[in-house]
């Protein structure tokens, strides 16, 4: 699959910010069939694609991608990753609030957290509609502040693509991520500087 096709399959939010990540291991949390794992691998990151669904993981497998079956919501099993491991962590269409502190601890000091999921008000458009799976207004901003992450970009509102939904999107970084590395114009210089 070409880089253009990989980017087309990925969320535009993830495709926009993933090239800013420093070289290093990536985590695609609750990866589903691996559209973002493939994008991260194409950018040169060794990727851990984690999900509880073995069929989804089979679809996510590929060059540069290690799949890991893990039930993120099983409170009896400890978080499987050590502190500071990942250069970039991507989460889309998934929310389990108790995981956020461990997730952030697994981010390298100069790492990127790129998060996009459903927000309150989404119940008007279908699933998910359970408040446990919908972010409160500005919640990702508050989580970033509580965990000492610097916000590079944030959105909170309605989207019509790929379907009508209320979403929040965040790109935040650890303290060691240099401000000049936040190439927000999406220029090729960001990608060339990393790989």
Image (cartoon, rainbow, N blue to C red):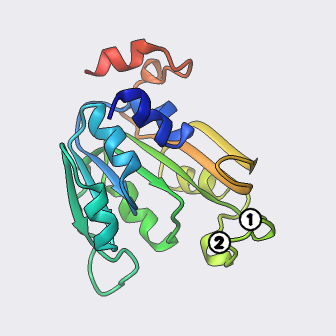
Q: Do the residues labelled 2 and 1 touch (CB within 8 Å)?
A: yes
Seen at 23% across and 55% down, the residue is 61
Say which label, 2 or 1, has the lower sequence index: 1
Q: How many marks?
A: 2
Q: In which quarter of the image is the N terminus?
A: top left
Q: Residue 122 carries which label?
A: 1
Extreme-top residue of the structure: 189
Q: Quadrant of the C terminus?
A: top left
Check the image and report above or below for 62 versus 98: above
Extreme-right residue of the structure: 124
Q: Nearer the viewer, residue 62 or 95?
A: 62
Q: Describe residue 118's horizontal placement relative to residue 38 as left or right.
A: right
Seen at 57% across and 45% down, the residue is 170
Seen at 21% across and 48% down, the residue is 62
Extreme-bottom residue of the structure: 76
Q: Describe residue 29's horizontal placement relative to residue 154 as left or right.
A: left
Q: Where on the picture, by quarter, is residue 5?
A: top left
Task: Find residue 143 and report its horizontal and vertical position in percent.
Answer: 56, 57
Q: Where on the picture, by quarter, is residue 45?
A: top left
Disc 2 is placed on an element classified as loop
Q: Provide the residue designation for mark 2.
A: 128
């Amino acid at each position: 699959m070409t880089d253009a096709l990989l980017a087309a399959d990925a969320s535009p939010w993830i495709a926009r910010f993933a090239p800013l990540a420093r070289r290093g291991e990536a985590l695609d949390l609750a990866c589903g069939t691996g559209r973002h794992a493939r994008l991260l691998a194409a950018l040169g990151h060794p990727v851990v694609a984690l999900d509880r669904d073995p069929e989804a993981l089979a679809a996510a497998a590929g060059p540069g991608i290690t799949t890991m079956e893990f039930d993120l919501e099983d409170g009896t099993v400890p978080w499987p990753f050590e502190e500071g491991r990942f250069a970039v962590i991507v989460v889309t269409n998934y929310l389990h609030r108790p995981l956020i502190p461990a997730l952030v601890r697994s981010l390298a000091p100069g790492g990127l957290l790129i998060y996009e999921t459903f927000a309150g008000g989404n119940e008007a458009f279908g699933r998910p509609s359970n408040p446990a799976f919908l972010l409160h207004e500005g919640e990702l901003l508050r989580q970033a502040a509580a965990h000492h992450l610097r916000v590079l970009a944030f959105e909170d509102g309605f989207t019509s693509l790929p379907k009508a939904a209320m979403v929040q999107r965040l790109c935040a970084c650890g303290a060691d991520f240099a401000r000049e590395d936040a190439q927000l114009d999406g220029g090729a210089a960001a990608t060339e500087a990393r790989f």
